[in-house]
Amino acid sequence: MFNKILIANRGEIAVRVIRACREMGIETVAVYSEVDRNALHVQMADEAVCIGPGKAQDSYLNMENIISATVLTGAQAIHPGFGFLSENSKFAQMCKECNITFIGPDAETIDNMGNKSKAREIMLKSGVPVIPGTEGSIETVEDALKEADRIGYPIMVKASAGGGGRGIRIVRAKEELKKAFETAKSEAKVAFGDDTMYIEKFIEKPRHIEFQILADNYGNVIHLCERDCSIQRRNQKVLEEAPSPVMSHELRKKMGEVAVKAAKSVNYKSVGTIEFLVDKNFNFYFMEMNTRIQVEHPITEMITGVDLVKEQIRVSAGEKIEFSQEDIDIKGHSIECRINAENPKKGFRPSPGTITLEHLPGGSGVRIDSSIYQGYTIPPTYDSMVAKLIVHGADRKEAISKMKRSLEEFLIDGIDTNIEFQLNILYNDSFQKGDYDTGFIQSNEDTLF
Ligand code: ADP
Ligand code: ADP
Ligand code: MG
């Protein structure tokens, strides 16, 4: 096992990884940008190294500085968290060349699965059901028009390098395609430095259901059941729950087997997630694989009792998974609400600033993964997600009531948050019945604000 790990991230996920390390007796090194001097992860780690100015490009994405900090502090491994360098194959390769363990899959796997159009091709060849669409990427508007005619409208234009819901446009008719293609392409160029595009058939009213994978270096691949992430705003997850309210035992078995097959076909190691879209008739299609720990991993931990970050560290250190698929059992129900510093009433405008008062909910079955504290100033520089509220109940009904009372206990003053917005989702009838799809927020706009 490693003696010391450097965490190349910030915010709640950096705190989450530090906690796992501490429990495992592993020393931690935090890295931080100049605007993150007072951040919680800096205070919690055993050591902390400043890696540059606030701009992510100069600090959390600065590979040379992060590698230098690792060598300087004698850390043997780097945990990349999510976002930033977590799906950067160049960085994974660089770690390898410097004899540092990248806690994730190898560079080649990231390359294959991180590129969404390439991943589609690989999955098609492996016999995994994929959303109908282009084979590989498309270059020009003319090609896009041709492909869209073949696939049939409505379609989705998507960036191969996309993530976080960006670089995606729905196109319902031919006339809209040119503009959508061009705006999504330029958004991708700015956000990901890569404007390769592809097209998929738009699935009407789908559910986003994803499977958690855990794989070691010895060919053992298991899944830890599903998460339903259909509550989304602009293709970005807002609330997640596990298990999915619409999942049957048979469908779980079928989808789980496909997810494991998908991971095996790319020789996957580490934790990862296979994302599917499921249509009204319960046909399911591979959408993408995330080759990293995910934001919503805690709900899986709550229902399976497996600590995914510890397992991720263990398999990276070359340990074997000590349980099998048969040992994975679902216990109860879990929900996560992403708490963002933003104002839903003002178009979800980010709301950085100083937290003047904070009271966190607690009690049985309540978990908070956060990076904020009273007196902390949230910089305007990064993602607006500042906390995750996770609950675990004996069943879905109890999880919902636990989440309601926890959101009602949660006090944050000094900044705007989406706590009330989340509460309105919990009170919605269709949500309570489990009857929703990815269009839920859009079609309930009048009651959620
Ligand atoms: P998850 O799939 O874990 O729910 P999200 O899509 O919410 O993840 O993304 C988690 C974080 O990582 C967000 O801050 C998001 O903006 C960022 N992110 C995800 N993918 C990328 C990417 N390809 N490039 C840059 N940032 C990304
Ligand atoms: P990201 O890499 O940003 O996470 P995804 O490919 O996972 O992008 O898509 C994000 C979300 O966009 C999905 O969860 C889903 O709600 C919506 N979406 C993506 N592709 C389609 C599609 N072909 N049909 C309908 N909705 C889609
Ligand atoms: Mg996705």
Image (cartoon, grey):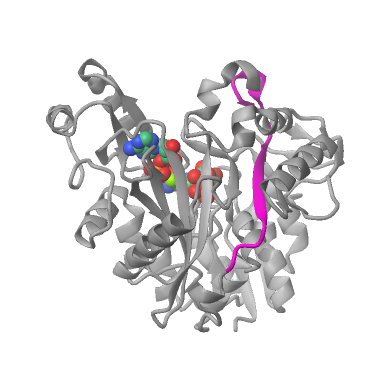
Q: Nearer the viewer, residue 195 or 346?
A: 346
Horizontal side of residue 104 vs 242, given as left or right = left
Give above or below for 9 relative to 234.
below
Residue 332 belongs to magenta span: yes
Q: Is residue 165 visible?
A: yes
Which residue is at 57% across, 60% downward?
Answer: 8
Give the quarter of the figure containing the C terminus: top right
Total marks shown come to 0
Residue 77 belongs to magenta span: no
Instruction: Write down the region rendered in magenta.
Output: 329-349
Q: Position of residue 197 (x, y in %)?
A: 26, 39
Q: Position of residue 86 (x, y in %)?
A: 48, 57
Kindly indicate the quadrant of the structure image that contains residue 418: top right
Give the quarter of the figure containing the N terminus: bottom right
Q: Position of residue 249 (x, y in %)?
A: 48, 58
Q: Is residue 183 visible?
A: no
Which residue is at 51% across, 55% downward?
Answer: 226
Kindly indicate the quadrant of the structure image that contains residue 273: bottom left
Horizontal side of residue 120 vs 232, given as left or right = left
Q: Nearer the viewer, residue 378 or 210?
A: 210
Q: Nearer the viewer, residue 116 or 232?
A: 232
Q: Position of residue 397 (x, y in %)?
A: 70, 44
Give above or below for 401 relative to 415.
below
Give above or below for 368 relative to 7.
above
